[in-house]
Amino acid sequence: MKGMKERLAKKIKLITIVSSLKQGLAHHKSKIDRTIHHIRDEIVAESGQRKGCVTPTLPELEYVDVSEQEHDVEEEEREILSEFEENCPPGGEDSVVFYATGLRGVRKTFEACRRVRFLLENHMVRYKERDVSVDSEYRDEMWRLLGRKVTSPRLFIRGRYIGGADEVVALNENGKLKKLLQGISRVHSPCECCLNERFLICSSCNGSSRLIAEDEETSNGTMWTRCRECNEKGLVRCPLCT
Ligand SMILES: [Zn+2]
Ligand SMILES: [Zn+2]
């Protein structure tokens, strides 16, 4: 009986210890909680003060509609282009075609061509140069487009006839040439195929413009036939820049 009492007493003691431990823990916990609350309040108060000192404001952004700007540029381009007569050289729908002469024979024409070429180079645009002194088909093409036997230079942009040297120089001075050339791809180096020579020596006839006729009887000497790959000077047009 005594032993039982002792065990009971021990149990009660243990319960008391455990419960006091629990109380202690609870006390600590509430202390920690209070500390956390305090710190949090301090942070809030501080940030409030900071807000009070420096009012954060967003920089005033100007609203720019890029697509609208692009639209305006296109519109302007179309307007300027429409001032010029529609007259499209072969392959000139979306490019710059320049009929010129590289021949120094007629000095005035040669110099006029050089002036236009200089302006095109200055604007660094990709253009097709068709030398009418090297290829008579180009000369005929130019005459056909303008309806009479005109001299070079003649400039066409996006299927419109722009004019000769005087017109192009004037357009450059009033800033319209730049606008007309907007959207034309830029170049920073000479043509990679012909180095701006515009023509290449025909590889079929090696520039002689004639070939030995294979189907002809050769009893009375060599028979020649005209090379079909090149022009009368044995040259072929550069496929990239003419
Ligand atoms: Zn070329
Ligand atoms: Zn040839």
Image: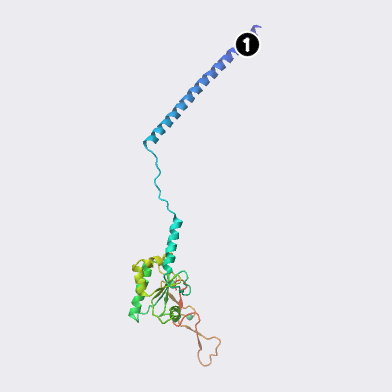
Tell which residue pokes out farthest to the right in this image. 1
Which residue position holds label 1? 8
Query: Residue, x 36% and y 69% (percent of image)?
Result: 171
Query: Residue, x 60% and y 12% (percent of image)?
Result: 12
Q: Nearer the viewer, residue 26 or 228?
A: 26
Whether residue 3 sits left or right of residue 102 in the image: it is right
Q: Position of residue 191 (x, y in %)?
A: 42, 70
Rendered position, 97 above or below 183: below
Whether residue 81 is visible here, answered yes or no, is yes
Tell which residue pokes out farthest to the top in this image. 2
Whether residue 155 sits left or right of residue 22 in the image: it is left
Q: Position of residue 160 (x, y in %)?
A: 44, 72
Q: Position of residue 224 (x, y in %)?
A: 50, 87
Q: Position of residue 10 (x, y in %)?
A: 60, 12
Q: Nearer the viewer, residue 220 or 159?
A: 159
Residue type (three-letter) at the residue carrying disc 1: Leu
Query: Residue, x 38% and y 35% (percent of image)?
Result: 52
Q: Secondary structure at mark 1?
A: helix
Whether residue 54 sits left or right of residue 224 in the image: it is left
Q: Quadrant of residue 77?
A: bottom left
Q: Nearer the viewer, residue 38 or 146?
A: 146
Query: Residue, x 34% and y 81% (percent of image)?
Result: 106
Whether residue 185 is visible here, answered yes or no, is no
Tell which residue pokes out farthest to the bottom in this image. 220
